[in-house]
Amino acid sequence: MREKTIEPDVAVLSEALQQWYRYYEVPPGEAASDTLCGAALRLYNEGHRTVQEIATILIGTYVGISSTRVNAPTSQLVH
């Protein structure tokens, strides 16, 4: 059976989200992950390519779990 590999960009986004969860010491959740993943994808598409860049922006933009429970932010809020 052929082993599945993870694309580098997926690994970057995944690690950035994991860093956000570790920083705020909250367990991963579906609603928060949806919000954070959408934001991380936008950041990646805007040219942020490293885990550190994306995680830092996510941590500064989404301060704690409660900030992920609002309606999805516009791209203006991410900048």
Image (spheres, grey):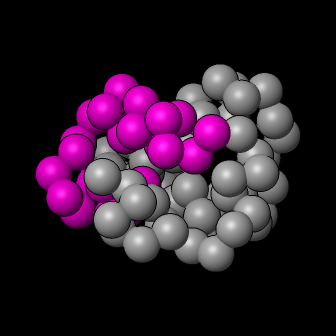
Q: Is residue 13 left or right of residue 47?
A: right
The quadrant of the picture occupied by the N terminus is: bottom right
Q: Does any portion of residue 1 appear in the rendered image?
A: no
Give how far across and how far down residue 28 sits, in percent: 78, 46
In the image, the segment drawn in magenta is: 40-63
Residue nearer the viewer, 30 or 60:
60
Q: Does any portion of residue 54 appear in the rendered image?
A: yes
Main SS of the magenta segment?
helix
Number of marks in the rendered image: 0
Residue nearer the viewer, 63 or 58:
63
Residue nearer the viewer, 74 or 13:
74
Q: Is residue 37 left or right of residue 34?
A: left
Please report the residue visible at 77 percent of the width from the left and 51 percent of the height from the top: 66
Q: Outermost residue, front direction? A: 76
Please report the residue visible at 57 percent of the width from the left and 30 percent of the height from the top: 19
- Is 11 contained in the magenta span? no
Please report the residue visible at 41 percent of the width from the left and 60 percent of the height from the top: 77
| The quarter of the displayed image where residue 42 is located | bottom left
Give how far across and how far down residue 70 sits, in percent: 69, 68
Please report the residue visible at 56 percent of the width from the left and 56 percent of the height from the top: 36
Residue nearer the viewer, 48 or 64:
64
Q: Is residue 71 left or right of residue 14?
A: right
Give how far across and how far down residue 75 sits, in percent: 34, 68
Give how far across and how far down residue 34 sits, in percent: 63, 67
Say if 75 sits above or below 14 in the image.
below
Say if 38 sits above or below 48 in the image.
below
Say if 34 sits above or below 57 in the image.
below
